[in-house]
Amino acid sequence: MDPKQLTDDQYTTPQVDLTTTELKRIGQAYRDGLPVRLEMLERLVPAAAAGSNDALWEIITEAHKLRGTAKLFEMNRFGDAMVDIEDLLLRVSNDNFRDSAAWLRVDKALCLAKCTLTQESETDHQKTEEQ
């Protein structure tokens, strides 16, 4: 059947049945990979600031992905830092990379993201000990 001809009640949402343990495992795997992903963003910033459109869009794309997934796993401060990075770089891309203050704010947001990882990791560890 052509998807354009389907009515709203004919669309189905895939059913996902994940246990709390599975969600925790997925969340932990996501958290464990974040330092490497942040390092990649940090390595791309100088190239993007120098005018590399490819580096700029790679950072924007990665920040967008990280922001959504962070919010899913209740890593709100980390997600907020990614929101800042994405929004700032979208503005920079429209300004032909000239906004040097935006690049300073991107660096600050990356530092904040790193700090929140440490803080959220410590909070998770404390929660685990309490249980």
Image: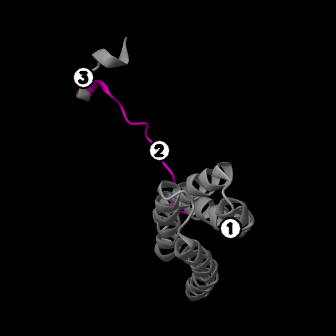
Mark 3–mark 2 distance (CA, rounded to whole Å): 23 Å
Q: Residues within 10 Å of mark 3 (few under 14, many from 20)?
A: few
The tag on residue 7 is 3
Q: Nearer the viewer, residue 75 or 79?
A: 79
> Is residue 112 shown in magenta?
no
Q: Nearer the viewer, mark 3 or mark 2?
A: 3
User: Of callouts 3 and 1, which one flags the residue occurring earlier in the amino acid sequence?
Assistant: 3
Please, what secondary structure does the residue beneath circle 2 have?
loop
The amino acid sitting under disc 3 is Thr
Quadrant of the rendered image containing residue 113: bottom right
Tell me residue 45's x, y (percent).
Answer: 68, 65
Please, what secondary structure does the residue beneath circle 3 have?
loop
User: Of callouts 3 and 2, which one flags the residue occurring earlier in the amino acid sequence?
Assistant: 3
Q: Nearer the viewer, residue 68 or 84?
A: 84
Left or right of residue 88: residue 27: right
Q: Nearer the viewer, residue 9 or 79?
A: 79
Mark 3–mark 1 distance (CA, rounded to whole Å): 42 Å
The tag on residue 38 is 1
**Picture residue at 62% right of the left edge, 55% below the top:** 56
Tell me residue 55's x, y (percent).
Answer: 68, 54
Q: Residues within 10 Å of mark 1 (few under 14, many from 20)?
A: some
For label 2, the residue is 16
The amino acid sitting under disc 2 is Val
What range is drawn magenta here?
Answer: 9-20
Q: Residues within 10 Å of mark 2 (few under 14, many from 20)?
A: few
Q: Nearer the viewer, mark 2 or mark 1?
A: 1
Q: Is residue 83 visible?
A: yes
Label 2 with label 1: CB-CB less than 8 Å = no
